Amino acid sequence: MLKCYQICIILFMFSCQVNSTNLPEKLLNIPINLISGETTSLSKSEGKKAVYIKFWATWCQPCRKEMPHFEHVKNEYGDYIEVIGINIGINDDIKAVEATIKEFGLTMPMAIDKSGDLAQAFRFIGTPYHLLFDRDLNLIHRGHQANESLDNKLALISQSKSVDLLNIDSLSENEPNLQIDLNDDKIHALFFTATWCDWYLKESRPQSAKNCISAQKNVNLLSTIYRDIIWNGVVSRLWTGNEDLNDYKTKYAINHPIEIDMSNSLFHQYSVNDLPTLLLIKNNKVILKVTNFSDSERLKKLIDESKASQG
């Protein structure tokens, strides 16, 4: 029969094992809704398998180049590492995702982050985005390339060998929220766009690229016509810094305030996953949403109707 101190030691060891991760509870249990209809989370793999998550987009050329590597990881290490693909859901849909899965013969579980919850939780800042967690769900890799560093860590954890941990703060939000008072009884126009959508999507999403150009030109014009509306450009933080924003402002001769949403708070709050998007907001309530900017007269009509509906 086990003595009391032996039972205490066993219980202590078990407690250490189940609480060995340094991830916050929210991140451990955030649901990852797969296109198969199933739902998973990091916590389901804790103590059983390491987890490799890759964020990607169908129009991201580096993502496409890495797809054979992604499938190789699944085939080579699938018994030891849970491999999960997460499409970022920006200018993408299930049809495009399924076509890419078929094209590259991908067999790992796949999710589409339409709500942006996963991108926000995992501090996503650009595709491709690789996150690797050991079997205890400690973060051991975070990066944008399927490189030698990632491959070495995949090989090591598949053999249950230890790998240096990363500071968990690297998955914490540390950028200030973009501060815009939207509860002042005035109509605000938030124009969501990206500094790269006009040129980077030119080959893979030509219609989206044209829409981005038309949108910025129309918003420039509308902001001079509707001066009773408070206009703000909200730029995606993906692959974008202050220099990129300055170049973009010069390129389009932008005459309204425009800033990078460095914390992704506004994109996430209003579930913006189509670029470009224009929202009219009054007292934090969306009164108009526009994603098609091909017809400037139609835009004016929609704005006029929205204003009239507010008295």
Image (tube, rainbow, N blue to C red):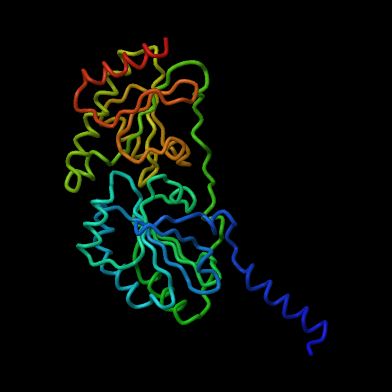
For image coordinates 25% across by 34% down, the residue present is 212
- Give the residue furthest to the bottom: 1
Image height check: is 83 above or below 55?
below
Residue 163 in picture, x, y percent from top left = 51, 74
Image height check: is 230 above or below 20?
above
For the N terminus, which image quadrant?
Answer: bottom right
Image height check: is 141 above or below 279?
below
For image coordinates 51% across by 80% down, the residue present is 161
The image quarter in which residue 200 lies: top left
Is 172 on the left or on the right of 34, as rendered? right
For the C terminus, which image quadrant?
Answer: top left
Residue 107 in picture, x, y percent from top left = 30, 68
* Tally of numbered discs: 0
Along the viewing direction, whichever of 44 and 172 lies nearer the viewer: 44
For image coordinates 21% across by 17% down, the residue present is 297
Along the viewing direction, whichever of 1 and 32 lies nearer the viewer: 1
Residue 81 in picture, x, y percent from top left = 43, 73
Is 132 on the left or on the right of 197, as rendered? right
Residue 191 in picture, x, y percent from top left = 35, 29
